[in-house]
Amino acid sequence: MLTEKEQKHYQPITLNRIFAVTSLLFLGSLIWMFADDHERSWKRYQKQFRQLESKKVEMTYNSQNYDNWLMWTEDEKIRIRAEGDRKAAENKLKKAKDEHYKVDQKFKFGKAKYDELTYRYKEAQAGHKGDPAELRQELDSFTYEGRPLFEGGDSWKVALGKLEAKVKIAENELQALKEKEKDIDKRFEQELGREQILAAQQHEKLEVARMSMGNKIADKIRDLPVLDLTNPYYRVQQVVIDDVIEDMNFVQVPKVDRCMTCHQGMAKISFSNEPHPYKTHPNLDLFLTSASPHPVEEFGCTSCHSGRGRGTSFVSAVHMPSSHQQELDWHHGHIGPIPEDKWHQMHHWPRPMFPAKYTQAGCFKCHAETTDLKGAEKLNLGLALIERAGCYGCHTIEQYKSRMEKRNIGPSLQRVASKIKDQDWTKKWIKNPKDFRHNTWMPTFYGNGSEDPTIGTGRLLNHRYQDGKRQQDEDHRVDTEIHAMTHYIYSKSDVFDVGTIPVKGDKEIGRNTFQAVGCQGCHEVAPDPVEENLASWSPTDIAEKRNQLRREYGPNLIGIGSKTSAEWIYSWVKNPLEHNPNTEMPNLRLTDQEAANITAYLVSLDQKGFEQTIVGQYDDEMLDTIASEFLQGSYIKEEIAAKLASWDSSQTLTYAGQKLINHYGCYGCHEIPGFEDAKPVGAELTYHGSIMVKKFDFGLVQSEYTDRHGHKHQKDHLPHTNFDWFTQKLKNPRIYDTNASVDLDTEKLANLDEVHVINEFKAFQDKLRMPNFGFTNKEVEAIVTALMGFVKQEALDSKIMPRTAKNVFYEKGQSIVAEKNCQGCHLIEDQGHAIKPSLLDWMMEQPEYEDLSRMEAKADLVSFVPPNLVGEGQKVKPDWLYHFLRQPETIRPAVEVRMPTYNFTEEEINTLIKYFSYLEPEGEGYNWVAVDAWQDNAFRDPHQLSLSTTELTAAKRLISKDGHHCGQCHWIGNQEPENKVAKDQAPDWVLASQRLKPEWMARWIANAPALMPGTKMPAYYDTYDPDHPEPESYTNTTPFATVLGGDDREQVRAIRDYVLKTE
Amino acid sequence: MDFIKDVINRVTDPTISFTFLLAVFFVIFPPNNLLLRLNRKLGLDKLWTDAGAIIFFGLLTIFMIFGVTSDETFRTVITKPDNVPIVLLLYIVPFLLWVCMKQGLANDARTLNNEKPEEYSDPDDLDSQILVWPDLIYVELIALVLCSVVLIVWGVLLKAPLEEPANIADSPNPSKAPWYFLGLQEMLVYFDPWLAGVVFPTLIIVGLMAIPYIDLNKKGNGYYSFAERKAEISIFLFGWLGLWVYMVILGTFLRGPNWNFFGPFEKWDVHKVLVLNNINLSELFWVKIGNQALPQNILLRELPGFVVVGAYLLIMPALLAKTVLKSYVDKLGLVRYSVFVILLLSMAALPIKMYLRWTLNLKYLIAIPEYFLNV
C-alpha cells in the first residue's frame, strides 16, 4: 500500500502556488475588464466640456470679489453668533426644550401602561380573561408617573402646554436674534447681484477646486466604477422619442438619441465659437430649443441628421465625412479635440449620418409637400433643379406626379415640322444641343468625352472605345441613330398653319418691347456662357441662383432666328395656347404691331449657329444593324432579314427611330406622337435615398487620391456610399459602363483621356442611357441633397406638418407659383423678382436714365418692376383677384411690364386666392379677416358706406393740396396726377372700391411702408393701430389737429371711405 | 510567392484536399493490422513524438505567419473576431490528438513488454486509486479559473462581432452559421435540408449515444491506448476529424460569397461565377443515358434513385456482413450489427455523395421536389 502522501498525484504545495498565480491573473483580468468598461470616449468629451463650461462660467463673474464677500459674510455670522445675548438665548431654549422633553416622556410612558391596564380591565368586565375586581383594584392603585400634576388640579395637557409655550418664547427670542444673519445675507446679495451668485453656484458645481472638501470627495466617488450606477456626474444623456420609429425590419423601436452625450453645448448659445463636438447648433431658432418648431425632446437629432442615435462613440454614431480629405483626417484619428478611435464607416448601420453638406436632405421626409422650405435653401435649390431639369420625365417621383401628368417639361414635338423646317438643324441639335445654346436644359445624349470648360469634366464617356474600328462604327452609328429619330418625329408631325404677319415689324422697337413687357421674366437672350454662377452656399447666393433658374424658365432665345421662321414666332407670341393647349407660355395680349415688332427682333437673333457639330450621312447597313438589334427580341435571324428586305429605307428609319426614341425616353420631356402612353424610361426615384447602397451598380469605376504626405493612392472602387454614386452619376451619367477613375480630392475624372467603354458585352439596350445635363459641381451637390432626402417615411403623422387647410393651401399655392414661374416677375415670400436685372438693363437704355449710373437708376427700379405681392391676400378682395387672374387689367397705367393672361383652371385660381390669404406679412400679427369670412363682410358693398357732411369736408381737406396731397401721384378717375413723370404715378382710386379690402386700405393710408417696405407711399399716421384700443398715453400723429378733432383714426377712416366712394 | 499561393489555393479545393485526407487518414490512423504495418513502414508513428509535434506545429505556424503577412484576404479571414475559435481549433485539436496518441503509443509499448499502462498509480494493483482532492477537484478548479481569465481577456480584446439588423431584403453574403454548425452547413451543399439539417444531426447524436452499446471492446478503459482500439479510434476519428473538423475549417476559411469555394489566398469576389450544372439521378438515367424525357409518373421517374438508395441501405449491410465485416456480425450479434452498419453507412454517405457531386455533378439520387423529398 502507498502512504497517503504518495497517493497524491500532485503536490498540494505546487497546486497552491499555481492556484495563487491563477487567482491573481483572474483578479487582474477582472480589474482590466472593469477599467476597460469604465473608460469611454464620451467621458473624455464630458470632462473637457466641464472644464470649458467652468471657464466660461468663471468669466461671467468676479470670483475674487465673490470669495471676499463670502468670507465677510461668514466672519460676520461667526461674530454675531458669539455675542452674549445670542448665547443666553440659545441656552434658554435648550433648557426649555430639555424640561419639556423630560415631562413629556414621563407622561407618555405612564399613559401607555395605564392604557394597557384599562384595556385588560375592560376585557375582564366583558367576561373574557381575568378577574374584574382584581384588575379594578390594580387600576386604582396604579401609580401614574406624573400623577402629582393631576392631583395638583392641573391637567397634564395644560402643564405640557405651558412648557411648550416656554419653548416657543425662547425660540422666538432666538429667531429675532437670527434675523441679523439674514441682514448679512441680504447685504451679500445686494453687493454681488443675483446673476453673480447664480454663476458662482454653478461654478461650484463644475469646478472641483471651488468645492468644499466633502463635495470634492463626493465628486470623485460618484464616478467610480460600479458606484456610478447611482448618480454619476458623467453620464449618457439621451432623449427617447416614442413616435419616431427606428425600423429594424422585424421590429420597430422608438428612436433613442444620445448625441448630446458628447455634443453637450448644442443648445447653449455661448458655445457657438467652440470646436465640435461642443459647438452650438447653427440654427437654434428652428431646432433644439423648446420655443423652436423642432424641440429636441420631440424630434431628437437623428430624425433629421440620420445616423445611429444610440451610438456613444464617434464611430458607432456613424458620422460621415463631407469630403475625402476629411475622411482621411478622420481615418487617421484627427477628429476633434480628443484623441479618438480611428474612423471607419460602420457598415452595419443602414442609415449613416448625412455628411454635413447634405444635412438639409433630412428636412424632406416630413416637408415633402413644400416647394420652398424656409431655412433649407440648398434642398430648395436641389428640388428646383430637379423640377427645371425635368428629372421626373424619365424617373417617376411621387411628389412630382401631378406635374408630370399636366405637361411635359420640354416643348411638344406634335407639330415640329411647322416650327423647325430645317431637319439638319434638328439633327445637329439632337447631336449636341449645347453647341447651339450653351445653357439649354436639353441634355446631351451623344458626346465623345471631351473636356467641358464650364464644368471642367468630361461628358458622356461611353461612346469612346479603345478599338479604333469599334469607335468608327460607334460614330457612324450615332449619326444614323439621329437620322432615324429625326425621320420619325418629322414623319409623324402634324402641320400647323402659322399664317402670315399682317404688319411690318420694327426690330429696334421690338427689342424695346421685348425688354419692357416682361418676356425676360422667363426668357433670356444670353449669348455667352457664364462659369459656375453660384458663388457660395449663402441664402442670398442661392436665392440669386434660383432667380437665374427662373430667368431660364423658358429657353434662352439666342439664335432663335436660325431655328424657326418669323411667321411661326409671330403666331406663337400672339397666342401660344393655340399652338399647344398645355404650354406654360402665357399670353401677353400683344397687339399685332407689338407682336410683329417682337418677331422682327427675335428673328434678328440668328447669328448663332452650330460651330462644331457635324452630322454625317447614314447608311443602310448601319440602319439595318440598329433595326435588327431591336427586332432581335421578337424574331429569329431569318425573319429579321426578310423583314428588313421588305422595308424601304423610310420604313426602316421610322421603325428604328421609334425604337430609339423609346430607348432614350425622349417622350419623357417632349410630347411625341405615338408615345402618349409610354412609361417613364428611368428608375423610380421616389424613395431613392432609402435604397441600400449595395443595390447600386458601381461598375468598375476606380478612384484615386493624394494623402497628406503627397503620395498618390489607387483604389479599385468608388467609395461605397449613395451620395458618391449619385454625384458621379449626375456628373457623368454613363460612367458606370466605363473604366473611369475618379480623383476623390477634386471629384473630377483622373483619366479623362483614357476613359472608354469596358463592358463591351452589354447589349445596346442594356447600356446606360441617361443623358448629361452638364450640371456644375454645386448644382450636383444640391440635387444630391434632394435625392438623399427622398426616403421612405419613418416619422409618424404627428411629426409631419399638420394637414390644416392653411398648410395644405400654402403648399399647393407654392407649387402653382413655382409651376407658373410667378416669381420670375413678382416678389412672393421674399423670393423672386428675377426680372429685375433685365428691367434695369432696359431702364438704362431709356432716355431719362442715359446720364445716370446703374446704382442711381436702381432707386427708380421699384416703379417699373412687377409688384411685390407681400400681403396680397390681405390687400385685395378675393372676388377681384379671381377676375384679375382670369382676365388681367391695367392697374398702373405708367408701367409697361404687364401681367400676362394665363390659362388657369378654376381650381388653380381658388388655390392661389387661398394661398395669398394665408400668407401673413412676416413678423406682424395683424388680425386680418379670414378669406372665408370675407363674404359676410360689411364692406363688401361700398354703397353701404355713408359719410356725414362733416366727414366729407374733412376728407376733402385731407386729400387736398393742403392736406396729404394725394392728387400729386394718384390717378383719380380720369384726372391725371399733377406729377407727370410716369414712374412716379400711383394707381387709380377708382379701382380701389372693387379691388382693395377696406381694412387693408385703412392701414395702407396710415402707414404704407410698414406693410410693404420700399413703397413710395409715405407713412402719414405712424402709430395707427386699429386692432387695439388706444392707450391713455396715445398721442395722435396727424399734423392736422383741427380736422375731425385731430383724431388719427377718424381721419384715416374718412379718407378711406372717401376713396371707396370715388367713382 | 504567387506560385506557392496558387498551388495552395488549388490543393485546398475540397476535391483534392478531401481526397488526400481520405487517402492518408487510414494510414495515419490504421484501423487494422495491414494498414498498421504500412503506417510503421512509412514511419508515420514518428508523428506522435516530440519532434513530430514540433515539426507539425512549426509548419502550421510558419504557414499562418506567411499567410497573414503576405496576403490581405488571408489576414482578413484569419483575424475576423468570428473566426478566432477556429484558429484556436487548428492548434488545440491536433495538440490534444497528439497528447492522446503519444500516451497511447507509450502504453502500447508497455503492453508489449507486459507492463501495465502508465495511468496505473500502482502498476501492480489494478484497483489502486488516487484522491479526488487534490488530484481531481483542485486541478479542475485551477482550470476553471484559467478558462475564466482567457474568456475575460478575449472578451475585452475582441468586441462581440455584431452585424446589421436582420433584413430579409439584404442577407449577408456569405451567410454563415455559427462556427460549431459549419459542418452541418457544409453538408447542405450535398444534401437536402431535411437530411443535412434534421436526419443527419439526429443520427450523429443517436450514434454518439449508441457507441457504448455497440462498442464491446473493454480495453483502453481508464488509460490511453491505440493498438488495443485501432478500429474504434479510426472510425470515430474519421467522423470527427474528416467529417466534422475538416468541414468546420472548410466552412470557416474557405467558403466565401455565395458559398463558393475560395482558396486561402484567393480574394473573396462576390461576383465569382462557377459552373453549377447539377443534375438528378433521374435525369442522368432517363435523359442522358436513356435519351428520353423524364417520365410523368414520379415513382417511375425516381425508380433509379429508389433502386440505388434501397441497395445501399438494404443490400449493402448484408453484403458487408458476408465479407468485410464478417467478424463484426459474430462479435456484435445481429441487432447491434444492424445498428452499427446503418450508422456506418450513413456516415459514409457524406463522402460518397461528395464524390458523386464532383464526378457526376449529381444533385440528388431521389428528387421529388413535389413532396419536398430529396435524397
Image (cartoon, helix red, strand yellow):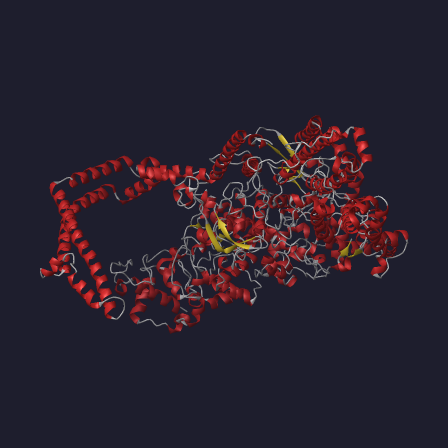
The percent position of residue A330, horizontal first and vertical second, equals 54, 36
**Residue closer to the observer: A621 or A631:** A631
Image quarter of the C terminus of chain A:
bottom left
Image check: A446 left or right of A404?
right
| Residue A211 in sight from this viewpoint | no
Q: Residue furthest front?
A: A1
The percent position of residue A576, horizontal first and vertical second, equals 62, 60
Image check: A1008 left or right of A173?
right
**Residue closer to the observer: A757 or A649:** A757
Image quarter of the N terminus of chain A:
top right
| Residue A308 in sight from this viewpoint | yes
Name which quarter of the figure residue A126 lies in. Answer: bottom left
**Residue closer to the observer: A924 or A512:** A924
Q: Residue furthest bottom?
A: A944
The percent position of residue A973, horizontal first and vertical second, equals 43, 65
The percent position of residue B61, horizontal first and vertical second, equals 67, 29
Q: How many marks?
A: 0
Q: In the figure, B358 relative to B100: above or below? A: below
Q: Residue furthest left?
A: A152
Q: In the figure, A260 relative to B97: above or below? A: below
Q: Residue furthest right?
A: B290
Q: In the figure, A298 relative to A69: above or below? A: below
Q: In the figure, B168 relative to B8: above or below? A: below
Residue ID at (13%, 53%) = A166
**Residue closer to the observer: A120 or A980:** A120
Image check: A123 left or right of A81?
right
Image check: A34 left or right of A212?
right
